[in-house]
Amino acid sequence: MAKRFIAGAVCPACQQRDTLALWRENNIDVVECVKCGHQMREADKQNQKSVREKEQVIGIFHPE
Ligand SMILES: [Zn+2]
């Protein structure tokens, strides 16, 4: 599986630059820091987005 590095990207876990490798696994984009092993997946990002949408719905909901 071909991995490519993301130029200029900073790992959110160890703050190192140019350590994030990107590849595709089961149609999911996987990003891994080769320095500390921190891993992020496209599926995780989608989960975070749906949480944010729910927060917005809660924000405009008026119970009175
Ligand atoms: Zn890292």
Image (spheres, rainbow, N blue to C red):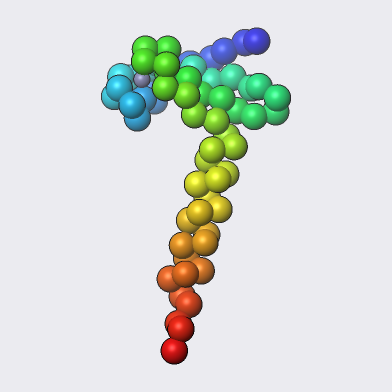
Residue reaching furthest bottom?
64
Quadrant of the drawing holding the N terminus: top right
Quadrant for ligand 1?
A: top left
Q: Quadrant of residue 2?
A: top right
Mark yes or no: residue 17 visible.
Answer: yes
Q: Quick check: 7 left or right of 1?
A: left
- Position of residue 50 relative to residue 22, above or below, is below
Identify which residue, 15 or 7, lies in the foreground.
Answer: 15
Query: What residue is rendered at 50% in x and 47% in y?
Result: 48
Percent of width and height locating residue 47: 55, 45
Q: Quick check: 14 left or right of 61?
A: left
Residue reaching furthest right?
26
Percent of width and height locating residue 12: 35, 30
Percent of width and height locating residue 28: 64, 29
Identify which residue, 10 or 48, lies in the foreground.
Answer: 48
- Position of residue 32 relative to residue 49, above or below, is above
Identify which residue, 9 or 45, lies in the foreground.
Answer: 45
Percent of width and height locating residue 19: 39, 15
Q: How many marks?
A: 0
Query: What residue is rendered at 54% in x and 38% in y?
Result: 44
Quadrant of the drawing holding the C terminus: bottom left
Residue reaching furthest left?
15
Query: What residue is rendered at 55% in x and 30% in y?
Result: 41
Query: What residue is rendered at 33% in x and 26% in y?
Result: 13
Mark yes or no: residue 6 visible.
Answer: no
- Position of residue 15 relative to residue 47, above or below, is above
Residue reaching furthest front?
63
